[in-house]
Amino acid sequence: MTVTDQKVDLIPDDYAIAGVYPNPFNAMTAIRCELPERGLVRLSAYDVKGRLVDDLFAGTLDAGRHSINWSPASLSSGVYLIRMEAGGVVRMARGVMVR
């Protein structure tokens, strides 16, 4: 898993998962998140039954836009929910894996 910082002049106004791209995906997808301030971030993936299937990232990120790559090699096709916890808020996004 890698984190890519996108250099932009504007700091986002709110916490957000800005997208899962590509979606649907098969081997790898990038989860884009936005943070209005530096802080602890945790990204996790869950199946549709609410079971944790992967911890994607846990650590400190600067304010701005970031991209976290996810390669779920051991998971089967299906819908997965990406959960971001940061700054006391929770944001969710949906990703569809097709094998």
Image (cartoon, rainbow, N blue to C red):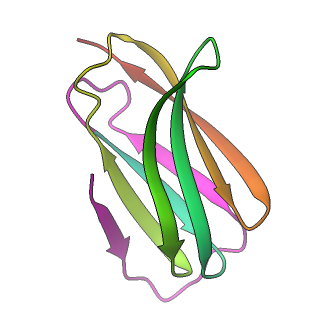
Q: Quadrant of residue 39?
A: bottom right
Main secondary structure of the magenta stretch: loop
Determine the residue positioned at 24% across, 23% down.
Answer: 26
Residue 12 is left or right of residue 23, and the answer is: right
* Stretch of the chain drawn in magenta: 1-28
Where does the image place residue 79, in percent across and percent down from the top left?
Answer: 49, 16
Determine the residue positioned at 38% across, 59% down.
Answer: 67
Where does the image place residue 86, in percent across and percent down from the top left?
Answer: 67, 62
Residue 14 is left or right of residue 82, and the answer is: right
Where does the image place residue 62, in percent across and percent down from the top left?
Answer: 51, 81
In the rendered view, would you say 24 is above or below 71?
above
In the rendered view, would you say 96 is above or below 63?
above
Where does the image place residue 85, in percent across and percent down from the top left?
Answer: 67, 54
Determine the residue positioned at 73% across, 49% down.
Answer: 90
Please, which residue is most extreme toward the bottom here? 9
Q: Quadrant of residue 51?
A: top right
